[in-house]
Image: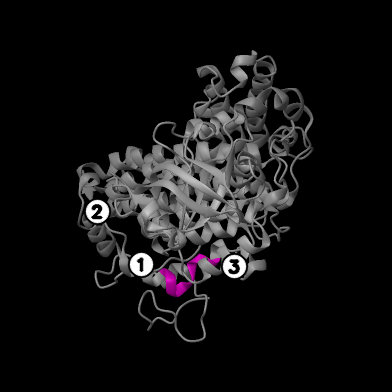
Amino acid sequence: MTVDAAAAPGTVPAGLPEPDLETYLGDPHDPANPLGFPAVLAADERGELLAEGERALDAYGLNAEFVPRALGGRFDRADRLARVLRAVFRRDTTLGVGYGVTTFIAATPVWTDGTVEQRRWMAELLLRHGKAAAGYNELAHGTDFGRAELRARRAGGRFLVTGRKEMVGNLARADAVTLFARTDDRPGSRSHSHLLLEMAALPPEHRRHLRRHRTAGVRGVLLGGLEFTDCPVPADAVVGELGGAMETVLRAFQVTRSVLPGMAVGIVDTQLRTVLRFALDRRLYGLPVAELPHARTTLVDGFLDLLIADCLATVAARALHVLPDQTSVYSAAAKYLVPKLLQEAAHRLAVVLGARSYLRDGPYGIFQKNLRDLLAATLTHASAAVCQATIIPQLPRLARQGWRCSPPAPPALFRLSDPLPPLDFGGLGLSARGVDNLAGTLREYGTRPGADPAVAGLCGLLAAELGRLAEVCADLPPRDRTVVAGRRSFDLTDRYATVLAAAACLGVWHHHRDDPFLGDARWLLAALARLAGRLGLHPGTAPDGARDHLFTELLTRHEQRRSFDLVDRRLAG
């Protein structure tokens, strides 16, 4: 579905209640487009969220993407949500975070454990273009939620909230806040609860907004805090069971950690397109920069990293529907490795762009904004170390069971157009219980009759690495199985996440053999070689002909204004 070409960007023509978001945002390079890169850069310089962008996303009804279909919204598939928001992140990361991500994070615990009334209330709020914030972190304790001090104590038929959350996105303009609060002084996992609060109903004399924090990236996001002093809130504000917030977090964060990396892929899509445009226009030594060996290699490597990141992010999102008992691992692996791949790719691309990568205006100004925004956006919600710490306690059981005997994942995990069962937020497993079907896909392919010999060879290298990991992880000492583990355990999770990325690429290729690009083994061989190179198992160079094939694909998509990700969709402009 496309928007009438005569319609202005950010307007919904009659008869098209849900236009294609890419087309809806208009040509990003058009200086007259209020949603184009010039307007985005100007808002960034002012430290503001793009007002025209917010109005346009309201008119589009973007909040409906965060609301389950059963509650009147459009959210029915996690991978689709990531792709829809990717269009916003291609345009303006600040808008993606400030308009969408904060609300999505705040609503997910409500969908996971809220009462019927709480879910309905949150859905109605979002469908009216309301905004929500999620108050978790405290500066004194960072991401160690178990030590959070903001307290809600019983007082008759209500709770009194005292304490502060200093760094919460969108809190100053939120209509609702999902607050993580201590409701029991005793230590342990049952000491905290979620509270769903309507900001307008909180008595102003018992709350005080704290100062806004200025940031290097996503400058327009309002990052501030709130201090409560014996603030009365109703008893029915508790989401789920009293003291059950940690369990809710373990489930809800699987959803957000699976979806956010897929959104961030859009940032590097724009980075790669910006640098490719420069490399084709700029000439050195009588040739376009894109024809110089180092620049060409960097562009192809950036394309590969984007495809690898998209494979892992997409598989993790689909796993929420297909393998809900295993996504505690896959979501953390995706949230850890995808940002790392994207950041590394962006920094290498900056070398090709050279001094222009520092410019804050002009035809390439969006690059430096995205470079700053990418770091901030990928830290949103969960840092790399937190995601690794989620995986570490599960390593020994995975090593003894999952990596040795788990069967391969079902085809629906990889087939992008296959229907998916409904997402049961509350049914997500707290632990994978030693099962790993994604790794089983990699281990099984190398021994399959009729397997592509070149693919099977690389799969064999990576499967052997999984075997080595199993030997080490099965015998981890008790201390190295906890969140206070040493560096070795964190290094092991890095290697494991890299193997999972390879398995995701293999599965996507194998189950799209009829697709002209995804079914061609050349991109897969290049991706597997690159991942094996990260692990020191291979030189990391793509086979002969694969790089030329990928560069030709990159040029073709650029010329035809198609995206560089798995979906390969038409873009505006």
In space, the residues marked 3 and 2 are separated at their CA atoms by: 34 Å
Neighbourhood count class around disc 1 (C-alpha, 10 Å): few under 14, some 14–19, many 20 upward? many
- Give the residue type at disc 1: Gly
Which type of secondary structure does the marked residue at label 1 adopt?
helix
Which residue extends farthest bottom?
Answer: 14
User: Which residue in the protein does label 2 denote?
Assistant: 365
User: Which residue in the protein does label 1 denote?
Assistant: 53
Sequence-first tag of 1 and 2: 1
Sequence-first tag of 1 and 3: 1
In space, the residues marked 1 and 2 are separated at their CA atoms by: 19 Å
Which residue is more in the foreground, 430 or 142?
Answer: 142
Q: Could you say which quadrant of the image residue 94 lies in?
A: bottom left
Which type of secondary structure does the marked residue at label 2 adopt?
helix
The residue positioned 32% from the left and 47% from the top of the image is 210
- Mark closer to the observer (3, 2): 3
- Give the residue type at disc 2: Gly
Q: Is residue 470 left or right of residue 199?
A: right
Circles 1 and 2: CB atoms closer than 8 Å: no
How far across and how far down the image is residue 122, in percent? 56, 63
**Segment colored magenta:** 57-64
